[in-house]
Image (spheres, helix red, strand yellow):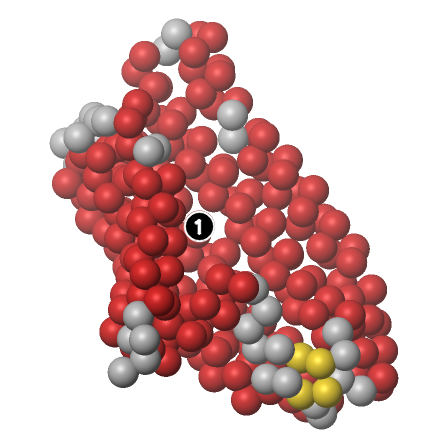
Amino acid sequence: MTQSEAEAFWRSTKRLAVAIAGGILSIAIGAGLMVALLPTSLNWLGVLLLIFGLIIGISAFIVVGLAHVRVKVPLDKRVLSTQIKVLAKDRQQDYSSSFTIALVGGVALCLFALFPPILQTIWSAESFGLLSVAAFIWILGSGLFAIVYGSMVYAGYSRLARADVFYAVTDPDDRMLTELKQRNPKLHGFLYQLYWPLVFVAYLLFSFVFGFWTLSWLIFPIAGVLFAGIRNYALQIPKG
């Protein structure tokens, strides 16, 4: 791997980090606005803002994610020279302070997000009930933005600093999805690009629209089992 290719990989990783972290924040902002506007005459606007946030977030996941794949796949199984590894370690060390700030700040925001609902419960201010939930979602989304962005950028440097050979696909689940793409491209596209966004939309509908808060969280474990079952079954089907 050349230095220009390593630099291109890091730039792509930063764009991916912004897209994923920004997508999460966009969805959180839309969800919070919908909750805040539910008791008002502008509740229809809240639903539109949620849909708009979902469109931005999901589009960012897909578009930037595919662009990142186009950058890293040509680098698959490239040997990492000592020069590149030293450069990656230097970048990692330079970014370590920013990573620490992002991680600590993100965790602090996630914890602070609990305060609006707690204060609302203590003060028994029913008129601010939904607003406290909206504040919880907004602050939590901001904390997740900091954690996700900082972690992904730091991992991009660490990935080249610790390995002797670069592999485009490192996670076993991702390798399974890559194999699935060769066997069934349409099913791969559904599982990799649409499945989890649809699951998240279903969770929001059951929670905010139908009010099934006590049961809606079950969507995620059930979806995880179904995801693994569909993928594993598809991988057992002989090629062709």
**Quadrant containing the C terminus in the rendered view:** bottom left
* Percent x, y of residue 86: 85, 78
Q: Residue at x 15, y 40 (%)?
A: 44
Q: Residue at x 30, y 57 (%)?
A: 230
Q: Can you see residue 59?
A: no
Q: Residue at x 54, y 64 (%)?
A: 172
What amino acid does circle 1 point to? Leu
* Percent x, y of residue 239: 32, 80
Please indicate whether residue 127 sits to the left or right of residue 210 in the image: right
Say which element carries label 1.
helix
Depth check: give the residue in front, 208 or 98: 208
* Percent x, y of residue 12: 56, 76
In this rendering, the answer to whether 53 lies above or below 158 is: above
Number of numbered discs = 1
Q: Can you see residue 122?
A: yes
Please indicate whether residue 50 sits to the left or right of residue 60 in the image: left
In this rendering, the answer to whether 74 lies above or below 101 is: below
In this rendering, the answer to whether 175 lies above or below 116 is: below
**Quadrant containing the N terminus in the rendered view:** bottom right
* Percent x, y of residue 190: 28, 65
Determine which quarter of the picture holds residue 204.
Answer: top left
In this rendering, the answer to whether 107 lies above or below 235 is: above
Please indicate whether residue 83 sits to the left or right of residue 136 in the image: right
Circle 1 packing at 10 Å, graded few (<14), some (14-19), many (20+), is many
Q: Which residue is mark 1?
A: 25
Q: Residue at x 82, y 64 (%)?
A: 93
